[in-house]
Image (cartoon, helix red, strand yellow):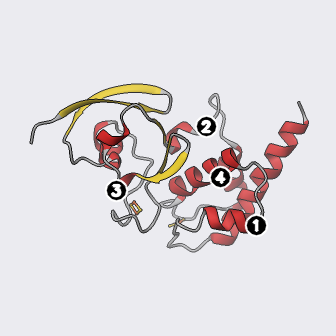
Amino acid sequence: MKKLLITLNVNGRDVEFACAPNQTLLDALRLDLALTGSKRGCDDSSCGACTVEVDGEPMLACTLLAAACEDRRILTVEGIAEHGALAAIQKAYGEWGGAQCGFCTPGFMIAVHSLLARNPDPSEDEIRAALGGNLCRCTGYNQMYQAVKAAIDAEKAGRRAF
Ligand code: FES
Ligand code: FES
């Protein structure tokens, strides 16, 4: 199959590479760009482990063609740290035990990141709805929700400090 030369903007950086027309974004990230944070759980849009942001919206990289993402902004878990420091949700996950085996964590991080970018003060129902497409086989959901709330409080306190 003839390959296409495409440029993706990933975590603020343009990267050019050759990909097959049917290559998924998840394969491009993991295999071509060595960004292995996004995970392959189900490979059929069921689990959320591969969630990345595309132009600010959470999307499932396992069923999205890489070539369809040209000229769009892609954010992976590797890009959510801010100026070399952990993002509030990353710190809160550590403090609240939001990760057990950690396999689902990158997808949850991106889902939370995009929720808070759209809505900095979500209600409990809004948090649960935003994370409803992400599954955790270790079933640590309560700790995750506590971590999200802690991250929201930390962001609010940070905003008040300026
Ligand atoms: S690997 Fe993409 S949704 Fe499960
Ligand atoms: S922490 Fe293990 S799958 Fe979620």
Q: Earlier in the sequence, mark 3 or mark 2?
A: 3
Within-10-Å neighbours for mark 1: few <14, some 14–19, many 20+? few
The percent coordinates of residue 147 (x first, y second) are 72, 59
Q: Residues within 10 Å of mark 3 (few under 14, many from 20)?
A: some
* Mark 3 / mark 4, whichever is N-terminal: 3
Q: Quadrant of residue 4?
A: top left
Cα gap from disc 4 to disc 2, whole angstroms: 16 Å
From the top left corner, tell me how far across and down residue 83 is, in percent: 64, 28
Along the viewing direction, whichever of 1 and 162 lies nearer the viewer: 1
Residue 115 is left or right of residue 11, and the answer is right
Secondary structure beneath dot 3 equals helix
* Depth check, front residue: 115 or 140: 115
Which mark is drawn over residue 70? none
Quadrant of the image containing the C terminus: top right
Badge 4, how many Cα within 10 Å: few under 14, some, many 20+? many
Q: Quadrant of ligand 1?
A: bottom left
Q: Residue at label 2?
A: 81
Task: Look at mark 4 in the image and give the residue it sits on.
Answer: 115
Mark 3 vs mark 2: in front: 3
Q: Are marks 4 and 2 in contact (CB under 8 Å)?
A: no
Q: How far across and how far down the image is residue 142, in percent?
A: 69, 71
Asked whether, in this view, residue 97 is left or right of residue 15, the answer is right
Label whose residue precedes the other's in the sequence (3 or 1): 3
Q: What is the spatial separation of the Cα atoms under label 4 and label 1, in whole angstroms?
A: 12 Å
- The residue singled out by tag 1 in the image is 124
